[in-house]
Amino acid sequence: MTKLPRRSLLEGLLALGAAGCAAPEAVTAASDRPEAPADAWQRVRDEFALSPAWIHMASFLLASHPRPVREAIEALRRELDESPPHALEAHEDPAPVREAAAAYMGARAEEIALTGSTTMGLASLYLGLPLRAGDEVLTTVHEHYATHESLRFAAERTGATVRKIALYERSRAATATAMAGAIEAAITPATRAVAITWVHSSTGVKAPVRAIAEVVARANQGRAPGERVVCCVDGVHGFGVEDVTMADLGCDFFSAGCHKWIFGPRGTGVLWGRAELWPTLRPSIPHFGEEGYGAWLRGQPAPPTTANMMSPGGFHDFEHRWALPAAFAFHRRIGKARVADRIHALNRQCKEGLEGMKHVTLHTPLDDAISAGLVCFEVAGMTPAAVVGRLRERKIVASVTPYATRYARVAPSLLNSEADIEAVLREVRALA
Ligand SMILES: Cc1ncc(COP(=O)(O)O)c(C=O)c1O
């Protein structure tokens, strides 16, 4: 395929019809040469420096930077190396980064704290909640280490307790109604926070955040402000996959690293929260902005907490943080709906293929409504590590779920093609 001029990259995708990746019709690119949708996705892939020697089925672990992000980082690195004070003065206002995140999330800039990872956002959030002895945080057994440990730290400091429930016994039998119902049944008068994960990296199940937020809202009816329950979400494996806004999700707080599905600079993340809830939080790391530092300089008490004050201070790898808008722009140029359609289509192809193999047990639901970009499975007679090892020998990068119950896991993403999925299926079939 003839390479198109750089400025026209992705434009074929922008020109695709509403049916996006599924549309068979060709698009006319800058060269006036019709381009098939598959070529347009190949050009997205071409924006990454990923080794072509491998089929990358674990891209969600840590992003490879696409070209616009690499270029933004390099330009900022040059600025910082030429004169760090000048670069700091030019970029110290976090507004452009917060605005880019807000535009992508369908939120407001003043509702967003900048973090370094999902984990940092979750820890700041859970350690910042106004918990007291006698309060309870309701969470699930499906959470990542980052949520469980942040909650343990928060409980040890405050005397609150943490209760873990199962949203499903078998992931393949999970339903949105049963998951929301399990939360509803477990909320008690002592519950102050519900801590959930949008897409479970243990099973690939996507929790019905909206339905759970509605359950929480119902539980809050008639409660005094200090007794209300907040709905907190580790959103990292839906962020950069699903075409939703924070209002669609309906939760109160949402933490996500931007260095996974968003393809943002490594070491970046966001913590979003409803505007009216930020004053209830207690920061743990001093913020280097006017609200915190300025008050300290003037000898004044710190003002009520804002989202900005929950962005941990100190100096950071600023060339990465300041380059984050390039990643949101990359996604928005492709289109959030098209991204979601593409990832779901590839995951469906993968799950349907695995489902048809007698020696494979698929653990991720087929239903798009309760799954996203992660596919977890087992192969009869093999450990998950052995499965992943065999795939690695065949030049396929997969992963083992880092949980007490381990599965082999692949994550079809924007960096994959239908042919990649066929190759994975062929190799898994050969393990029979
Ligand atoms: C559900 C979930 N939450 C949090 C994390 C950690 O993310 P981060 O590296 O952004 O802290 C992971 C790791 O991949 C994860 O699977």
Image (cartoon, rainbow, N blue to C red):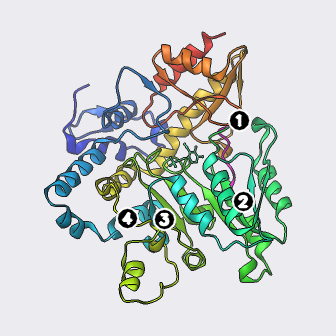
Cβ of mark 4 under 8 Å from ligand 1: the answer is no
**Residue at the spot of label 1:** 404
Do residues under tags 4 and 2 come within 8 Å of each other at their CB atoms? no
In the rendered image, the vertical position of residue 138 relative to residue 288, given as above or below? above
**Residue type at the position of mark 4:** Gly
**Residue at the spot of label 4:** 314
Q: Alpha-carbon neighbours of circle 3 within 10 Å: few (<14), some, or many (≥20)?
A: some
Residue at 86% over, 60% down: 185
Residue 430: give x, y in percent of width and height. Answer: 60, 9
C-alpha distance separating marks 3 and 4: 28 Å
C-alpha distance separating marks 1 and 3: 36 Å
Residue 95: give x, y in percent of width and height. Answer: 35, 70
- Say which of marks 3 and 4 sits in front: 4
**Residue at the spot of label 2:** 211
C-alpha distance separating marks 1 and 4: 35 Å
Q: Quadrant of the N terminus?
A: top left
Of callouts 3 and 4, which one flags the residue occurring earlier in the amino acid sequence?
Answer: 3
Q: Secondary structure at mark 2?
A: helix
